[in-house]
Amino acid sequence: MDLNAPTGIQPWWQRWRTTRAAPADGLRLMLAALPLEVLHADDGLSRFLDAFEQANPGCQLGLQLAGEDVGPARRAMVQRCDGVRQCALREGASRVCMGCRERGQHRRVCRLGDGTEATAALLLDTPRAAGRGLVRLLEDSARGVDVAAQVLRHKRSQQRKQATFQHGALARELHDSVAQQLGYLSFQASLLQGRLNEPAQATAMLGELRAALGQLQRQVRELITSARLTMDGRSLRQALADSVAEFSRRCIIVFELDNRLADDALNPETELQILQIIREALANVVRHSHARHVRIELRQGRDGSVSVTVQDDGIGLGPASVEDNHYGLAIIRERASSIGARLTLDSVEPHGARVHLSLAAAHAEPHADPSRSQQDEQHHLIADR
């Protein structure tokens, strides 16, 4: 009988190859896509483990990976090794767990990566000793899951950095807007209390208080909705002029603004940071410098570089003033660093202080899309593996 003759009935070995090999090929296709999958779905690893078990009935696949929870059933797989002697999970080997075999459990442990990380492994429990094909599939899975785990760790790291940045940005905006306004309102309220016997002046000061409260309410509402201040559609030139006028109303200091930047010299994010740096510098002058005159200069070099200077004729940067204003100065430095600018703070002879910001032309150009940059970085990480 010709076993290769076309009888219309699929031979048993072809049926076995279809039912056995096809699921394995499907799993390997999933492994190839797994690094990208975990970028977009937090449960990407769990779904692969589920697919592995569906393709291999009777098997249970667990994952031990620091910082990742793959469900209570798979946590129980790891916990079952507690108290078992010579457990491969604790010995750092990729082999059959002899300790589990002594209690009637067929378990194979396959380390992720080079095996040096004792907390990263795949655990396969089977009803009987795993065959060569299943072991090879497990090893392939370990390599694929290891790449996905590295991508996932990178993703988690980026998420933590982003959360830290957002918290820091919110703290800066609260300090730069709400705290400044509240300090001004407190100062105005004290002055108003001393002018209650002078109705005309008290009425004028009350009008300023109402205007400041309205502005503070708008800023708080803006922080609630977007967790950051904006320039309200204004150009940097307009926003700087408004800021100088605002600070001029607060005190008797004379402010001089000399802005020679082109309107398109900076990208919007850099404009916002520079505006807030100047505002923080002016707030420091009002609070701490005892100055009578402040000059704000913005210049653009032929090579596209930008310089910003805020200089006052106050008491300078003595140790006492720096200590009193350490948080404000830290915010200025952090803002400058975020846009790649060089910041210097120094005293001016015979008296006064100067804040100088230097921004190279490359940092003044429009920023790339941060989400696209992160995807490109993650893509390179995958490709390098």
Image (cartoon, rainbow, N blue to C red):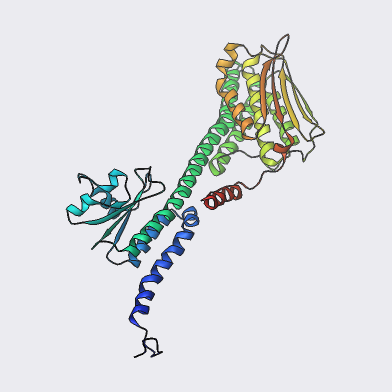
Which residue is nearer to you in this view: 114 or 19?
114
Residue 382 locus on image (x, y percent):
52, 52
Which residue is nearer to you in this view: 168 or 185?
168
Q: Quadrant of the N terminus?
A: bottom left
Look at 66% across and 36% down and name the residue there: 272
Look at 80% across and 37% down and name the residue there: 262
Residue 365 locus on image (x, y percent):
72, 41
Residue 250 visible in rendering: no
In the visual, does 62 lie left or right of 326? left
In the visual, does 131 lie left or right of 328? left
Q: Residue furthest left?
A: 103
Look at 68% across and 32% down and name the residue there: 274
Q: Residue furthest right?
A: 302
Q: Is residue 301 above or below residue 319?
A: below
In the visual, does 350 lie left or right of 157? right
Residue 54 visible in rendering: yes
